[in-house]
Image (tube, rainbow, N blue to C red):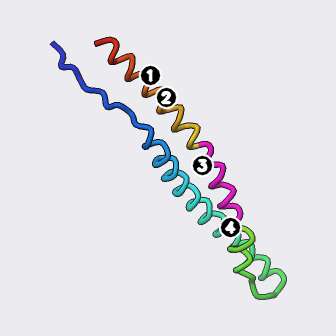
């Protein structure tokens, strides 16, 4: 006879926590990649024009706004995905409870 497994009931407070965690990680990653690309472009541009590179411009006017935009999009998408996951898990837990 198989042993009945208890299925953990999903909670709503896990949704914003997971969404914010994913948003933080992907925003940080996008900031780092964009900053690297912007610095490389600024250094190459400075080498071509024989001027000193303006690296604060790469941080303030390129990487930071791009990271904010990516963070906003990732937050919306991760909230939608997590809410759908919560609703599906609640439905499956209800089906499992009803079938016992």
* Distance of label 3 from label 4 (alpha carbons): 18 Å
Magenta stretch: residue 50 in it? Answer: no
Which label sits in the foreground, 4 or 1? 1
* Distance of label 1 from label 3 (alpha carbons): 24 Å
Question: Which range of residues does the magenta coloring cover?
Answer: 63-77
* Distance of label 4 from label 1 (alpha carbons): 41 Å
Secondary structure under tag 4 reads: helix
Q: Residue at x 43, y 43 (%)?
A: 14
Q: Are marks 1 and 3 in contact (CB under 8 Å)?
A: no
Q: Are marks 2 and 1 in contact (CB under 8 Å)?
A: yes
In percent of width and height, residue 68 lies at: 66, 60
* Distance of label 2 from label 1 (alpha carbons): 6 Å
Frontmost residue, 98 versus 71 = 98
Q: Are marks 3 and 4 in contact (CB under 8 Å)?
A: no
Left or right: 52 in relation to 6 = right
In percent of width and height, residue 81 lies at: 55, 37
In percent of width and height, residue 79 lies at: 56, 42
Disc 1 marks which residue? Answer: 91
Secondary structure under tag 3 reads: helix
């Amino acid at each position: 006879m198989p042993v009945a497994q208890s299925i953990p009931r999903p909670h709503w407070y896990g949704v914003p926590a997971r969404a914010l965690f994913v948003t933080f990680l992907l925003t940080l990653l996008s900031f780092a990649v964009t900053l690297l690309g912007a610095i490389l472009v600024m250094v190459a541009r400075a080498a071509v024009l024989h001027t000193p590179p303006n690296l604060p411009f790469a941080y303030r006017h390129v990487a930071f706004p791009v990271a904010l935009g990516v963070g906003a999009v990732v937050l919306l998408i991760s909230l939608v995905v997590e809410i759908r996951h919560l609703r599906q898990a609640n439905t499956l837990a209800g089906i499992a409870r009803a079938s016992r």
